[in-house]
Image (cartoon, rainbow, N blue to C red):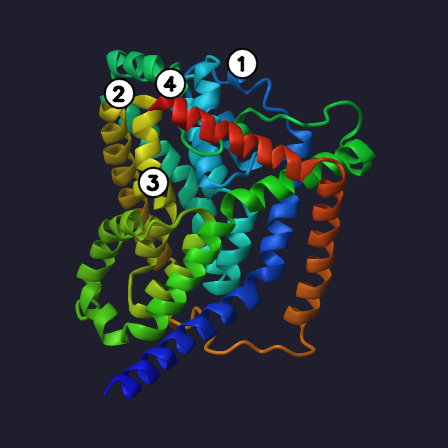
Amino acid sequence: MVGPLVTMLGAAAADALRLSFAMTWDILWALILGFALSAAVQAVVSKAEMARVLPNDSPRTLAVASVLGAASSSCSYAAVAIARSIFRKGANFAAAIAFEFASTNLVIELGIIMAILLGWQFTLAEFVGGPLMIAVLALLFRRFLTARLVAEARVQADRGLAGVMEGHAEMDMSVTEGPLLRRILSGRGFTAISHYFLMDWASIWKDIVIGLLLAGALGAWVPREGWQAFFLTQDPRLAAVWGPLVGPLVSVISFVCSIGNVPLAAVLWNGGISFGGVISFIFADLIITPILNIYRKYYGRRMMLFLFATSYLAMAITGLVVELVFGGVGLIPAERVAIVAEPEIGLNYTSVLNVIFLGLGALLVARSAKSGGFAMLAMMEGGRRNGEHGGH
């Protein structure tokens, strides 16, 4: 009896791993491209002036915060750490949070991965829904955020308790002198790009791996009928409302953030979640349980609960609006074929691109290693652990 059980479990694990590898192979080149572009932008966009240009919560300031956030593309943990850093330096709290949301939800690497695994319509929805979500969040802040709560959050923030990626938040290696192209192509610029590339990968690789493994397991093990029952697909109108409401909650308990939740979103889409539900799920990377715990450390329990409630409402409302608008103009895909069943490794465009960008990634990592990038990561990790020890 044990033998057949072991065989069955082994076959199930193999199915999940095959599906995970299929998704990994399809998106590998795009991940490297996205992180390289993000690193190049960070290398020429300085963090030093962010607090100065984000003094209030006016529409203009929030727009600037969103543009800066998209340019300073980060993993969820780094985005949260950077937001606290600029808040402590004097930035308006609402503007700092707008920056944070833009730096994870309005970034090119997320759009590329969504286009590959889900389709271009989802990428368009990301760039339409992201600004809308920030606008809704800003309105909720204006209505419900009190000066007293902000003051409490600032006192807590100034305690400097460690969360994750504080070193990334404080690090500014940007090259700001000279024309843009010259900065990027200079030796100093290339070194800065390589360091940001390494730091971004170091900060997010665990989420990507967990997301791919979880997506592979759920895609291989959960029958389509189970997903359809959960997402109420038997009633399309109810499903269109239910998806955006439940999508963020699924994200909260999945523990996967940033780009790592896109493969899982593909599984949910194939399973029957609504179009708007996919968008609200992907946007909810900033209210997963580990991030909420960091909010508690950074700003206190009351602000953590406030951020969870307002963020959830903004994500759900955005998902509902995206569902209505994209459905109204006929941009919701009719077929649910988000992910491949088996990888096709051969002489095709995916394999060629993977080889090319693996070479680029290796070049950047080698440059970073030669210029002290790994030592910098070790120092940042050591500082984070010491900060956590001191916080206790």
The mark total stands at 4
Residue 344 appears at what percent x and percent y?
A: 58, 78
Mark 1 or mark 3: which comes first in sequence? 1
Mark 4 or mark 1: which comes first in sequence? 1
Label 4 – label 1 distance at C-alpha: 18 Å
159 or 339: which is nearer to us?
A: 159
User: What residue did someone put label 2 on?
Assistant: 145
Q: Quadrant of the N terminus?
A: bottom left
Label 3 – label 4 distance at C-alpha: 17 Å
Would you place residue 257 above or below residue 12 in this image? above
Label 2 – label 1 distance at C-alpha: 22 Å
Residue 387 appears at what percent x and percent y?
A: 44, 24
Check contact, mark 2 vs mark 4: CB within 8 A.
no
Instruction: State the image quarter where residue 270 is shown.
Output: bottom left
- Which amino acid lies under the numbered mark 2 shown in the image of this protein? Leu
User: What residue did someone put label 4 on?
Assistant: 157
Q: Is residue 215 visible?
A: yes
Check contact, mark 2 vs mark 1: CB within 8 A.
no
User: What residue did someone put label 3 on?
Assistant: 290
Check contact, mark 2 vs mark 3: CB within 8 A.
no
Instruction: State the image quarter where residue 57 is shown.
Output: top left
249 or 12: which is nearer to us?
A: 12
Label 1 – label 3 distance at C-alpha: 30 Å
At label 2, counting other C-alpha atoms closer than 10 Å, the crowd grade (few under 14, some 14-19, many 20 or more) is: some
